Amino acid sequence: MPDTLLPVMPPADPPAPARSALMPLRVRDLTLQMRGQPLLDIPALDLDCAGTTVIMGANGAGKSLLLRLLHGLIAPSSGTIAWGGAAMSPAIARRQALVFQKPVLLRRSVAANLDFVLRARRAGTAEARDALLARVGLTHKASQPARLLSGGEQQRLALARALATRPDILFLDEPTASLDPAAVQSFEGIVSDIADEGTSVIFVTHDVGQARRMAREVVFLHQGRITEHSAAPRFFAAPQSRAARAYLAGQLPL
Amino acid sequence: MQDFGDAIGLALNLVLSGDADLFEIVLLSLRVSLTATAIACVLGLPLGAVLAVSRFRGRQAALVLVNALMGLPPVVVGLIVYLHLSRAGPLGFLGLLYTPTAMIIAQSILITPIVAALSRQVIEDLHGEYSEQFRSLALSRRQVVQALIWDARYSLVTVALAGFGRAVAEVGAVMIVGGNIDHLTRVMTTAIALETSKGDLPLALALGLVLMVLALGINAAAQSVRLTAARFAYA
Amino acid sequence: MKTGSFLAALAVAATLATDVPAQETTIIVQSTTSTANSGLYDHLLPIFERDSGITVNVVAVGTGQAIRNAANCDGDVLLVHAKPAEEEFVASGGGVSRTDLMYNDFVIVGPPSDPAGIGGLTDVHAALRGIAESEALFASRGDDSGTHKKEMSLWNAAGVDPAEASGAWYRETGSGMGATLNAGIGMGAYVMTDRATWISFGNKQDHVIQVQGDEQMFNQYGVIPVSPEACPQVEAEAGQRFVDWLVSEAGQAAIGAYRVGGQQLFFPNAPEPN
């Protein structure tokens, strides 16, 4: 395990769930610029974490961009990303899934949205679809138009669709940002179960409460740089960076 | 405006009396133009979808070309098809000139660019919404195109209607390749042209009214399909 | 050729999409518009089709285009009215032989105010000179049709070159007889038309016949079977049967019997079969 520039504290307790096959993640000298603007600058990031890693930071800190880089949706300006020892590739991206902040559902029924992905991945059986629907609590809505579901139901369907690809890594990009508390709770419950079953979840949020509930590790981003990466209990008990302290205290980090 | 009053009376009379010639002409118009629309959709929708989702060298030129072809004059299409299907032409051995098939071919050529160009726009808009999600799902190009066409299906109904409208209303191409032969290739527009040239303006107008009512009916049906779709948030 | 293969594919698709008509002998007549628009075929064809079992499809275009279409082998019989052009078509090998079929005559129609003062003239040359001198509006087909060819030969014989006034008082519509009549009547112009078209024309408004009766305005129709040597796909036998019937006693009688509003439109004059 080579040294990183930032402190990484492996979680001591509770017992870690099984580790995803795509781990560890190793990021080196990663930068991203758009139209001459530097947006991300990450000399090193190592994740070898089962369960849920939360990427936290203020709006515009670069959380969503980092997620897209890790998923291969955008290419870095420089630097390398490697998963499980192999450089980022379309084959690796196929073993990952992403739930976006705003669910993009097909103009079809709930069941057809899942069937589409199951068929595309040649994993399509009615049983698989029904199991996914049951898992996210949408069995009774199977034949309804997907885009008429409530916000929380739509996001659960998006989660089920992500799970349909049987991902090793599940990225969540502020999926509950516009949901009511009950919907958030139900969503978080499902994600916790997924993480416990051995899928590594990388969860972007700016909701401190959600981060406390979900995270085993926290990566804190501030203005395109990682200012802190530590186990969740330690992060919340004693944040090391000034930006993280200010953020947790509810102040605008400067 | 005397002629117009006559025309409305005559149109009603023709329709209500169940004029056999009129129904034959109307049915042929529908058969030719609907078949041409179907062919144009089979060719034009995938073409439009590929243009919408692909990025390749010369794409801008291809877009300009397809958009320009929307303005193809029907007479020119008719002439090109005539020169090919004429017995003296390369495809003369097929014996298709002066048949409904020739008219279908000409109208298909006329409206395929319309379907391709308009569906490209519709599908590109939808792709803007879906593309990141689709890339995350690591779909193949073929899967993306199929999904986009299916999900844009209700908007594409409008595209198909635009093509149908152009086909059923054009006279130049079907006149040349169909020959306006009574009981064989006479359609609404060539019948209107014929009656106009005979100076029977009320009958020409009456046929025009029937054509308009037909177009209204088809558009109303499509509109109700779209409204249903909107209710399910599918449009 | 790329468009060719594309068209071929379309042709296959379109053929599959349409039902194939039952096998029966069908011929195509490339015809001048006046015979079609006046309703003559609606009168003649049912008789012939009943007696022969041959279906006749008529494509009605200007004489010039009809001859060109026939030269492309896109017809089995040619029925037009421009004798020199017809003889040229036969001489070039496109047609088997030309036979006189029937005649009517041309007339000059004009507004009742008769701005050129030619009403009642029976000398068409004098009438045309009168139009030219008064620069009264004259609408011409301008489309290389039989009527247009005839009109040009009359202007020529009258010693007037109307092309110099093209766009001024001489208006070339470049379209069919009906369209030219509609335009000419709309602008209050004189128009030369065959009598059959005029009698059956539905949009005369107040235009009347101003000039008629000159032998120069005789309008002869001829009929020509398209040559199977020039066009191997031609329905030579059926086409010949149609021509034979038209010039037969029965066909000639049928032509003579056709009336619109009580008026005879075409006068059969095929030579006696020997």
Image (tube, coloured by chain):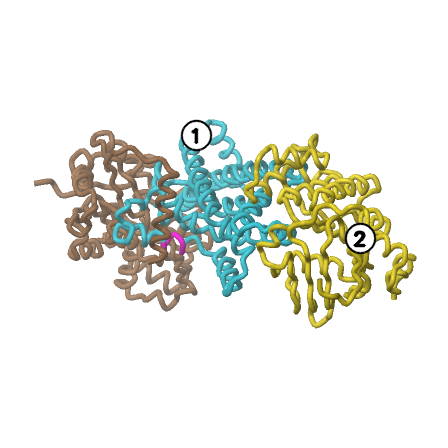
Q: Say which residue appears at 54% left-offset and 44% top-offset.
A: B161
Which amino acid type is shown beneath numbered disc 1? Asp
Q: Say which residue appears at 26% left-offset and 44% top-offset.
A: C29
Q: Which chain is the one coloured yellow? A: A
Report x, y in % for residue A44: 72, 66
- The quadrant of the picture occupied by the N terminus of chain B is top right
User: Magenta segment range?
Assistant: B76-80
Q: Say which residue appears at 79% left-offset and 51% top-offset.
A: A216
Report x, y in % for residue B115: 51, 50
Mark 1 belongs to chain: B
Q: Which chain is the one coloured brown? A: C
Report x, y in % for residue C21: 31, 34
Q: Which residue is label 2 attached to? A: A11
Crowding at mark 1 (Cα within 10 Å: few <14, some 14-19, many 20+):
few
Residue A136 in the image: above or below residue B122: above
Residue B147 in the image: above or below residue A246: above
> Which sits in the foreground, A143 or A157?
A157
Assess whether residue C253 is covered by the magenta stretch: no
Q: Which residue is label 1 attached to? A: B19
